[in-house]
Image: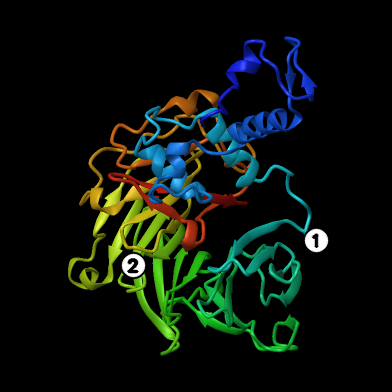
Amino acid sequence: MTRPRKDRSTCEGGSAPDGVVTSRGHNVPSSYLGHEVAQLTKLRSEPNGLLSRVGLGKSLLPVSPVMMLAGRESNYSGRGRFSSADSCHVLSRYLPVNGPRRIDQMNSRAYVSQFSADGSLFVAGFQESEIRIYNVNGGWKVQKEILAKNLRWTITDASLSPDQHYLVYASMSPIVHIVNVSSSVTKSHANVTEIHEGLDFSVGDDIEGELSFQIFSVKFSTDGRELVAGSSDDSIYVYDLAANKLALRIPAHKSDVNSVCFADESGNVIYSGSDDNLCKVWDRRCFVTKGQAAGVLTGHLEGITFIDSRGDGRYFISNGKDQSIKLWDIRKMSNKVTCPNPRLRDEWDYRWMDYPPRARNRKHPNDQSLATYEGHSVLRTLIRCYFSPAYSIYLTAPSLPIGDWSSSG
């Protein structure tokens, strides 16, 4: 940033209009001093001049943090990093500095929390059978209050349909319930004020019924016609809503499948994450003939708690009990596990034990992830991670996609 040119006569003892006396005894016009202060303020709060021109030619229009990140990755400033002014600009304008505020308080723990795709709604599921949908744009008022049916211990997952008309919720059973959240009924009491239709994910000849397995994850497809679910019987399930029947069961992992999602709008590719430490990619077009995953991605040292797709059929992120989030490119996947998954020799349970400090420095010998993000804790709950909304999800630098992510318990 160019500082104002000093008046040579003033600096060297020449005459100056009446105004402010500097420490050297010179009279400096108050307007000049004001300009100096203004320049210093801009210097400390605005991005580097080179970054502000990224993609904008010679224009000095307000620069977005995305453009600043692009400039940093392309090293427009020549430093390879943000300057102190750049950092101050981002911190003062684009990162929350006032701390969180309480929106609501219930009598039980919240196990599910997620924004809708456009950020206008927020869904929270609580242990005592209750799900609340908040209207973010309407001052976080409760738009729908749902009292769940046949709850077993807690709400394990919930998902809004793409048109935001329906919500499905899962519990510790193979039955997923669907609710019309666009109806005029504000308080939806299962099968009292509204019907919460049950979708049975169990196999037809399963003699154990509702105690056979539990569903930990459930997600709508992009077109809203199907659901995909991950379960405690190490399997992935796909439910056809139009036909109202189970369409596919995949014996997918060697342990609980904690999270699943569709990769993109086609609905053909599915991502899964399990307590066996592995992320897998499934192509439904090939599964019938091959009966196996299209690819495996290794890198986590403990179980996968959640995965989220970028929506382009290439990139996704995963959160693990090894206290890390990883960014993946499925073009780097393997056909099979090429080396054993190293785990802690000591028995460690995230539900009541701190992660051993010595384990934080461990690295997987065959880590296929693009990037690893650390600094958070995965304790006492299967913490979830998400990409931010599509308009600010990520940017593509010349060689590497940069992903913004957030997490919720």
Percent x, y for residue 177?
58, 78
Quadrant of the image occupied by residue 35: top right
Choose the circle earlier in sequence order: 1 or 2: 1
Few, some or many residues within 10 Å of mark 1 (<14, 14–19, 20+)? few
The three-letter amino acid code for the residue at tag 1 is: Met
Give me the disc on residue 106.
1
At mark 1, the secondary structure is: loop
Q: On screen, 31 above or below 118?
A: above
Whether residue 341 sits left or right of residue 360 in the image: it is left
Around disc 2, counting alpha carbons within 10 Å, would you say few (fewer than 14), some (14 to 19), or many (20 or more)? Answer: some
Mark 1 vs mark 2: give the one in front.
Answer: 1
Q: Residue 111: x percent and y percent? A: 65, 58
Which residue occupies 74% across, 87% down?
A: 185
Along the line of sight, the residue nearer the viewer: 87 or 228: 87
Q: Where is residue 110 drawn, in percent x and y?
A: 70, 58
Cα gap from disc 1 to disc 2, whole angstroms = 37 Å
Classify 347 as above or below 388: above
- Disc 2: which residue: 250
For this rendering, which residue is in front, 148 or 306? 306
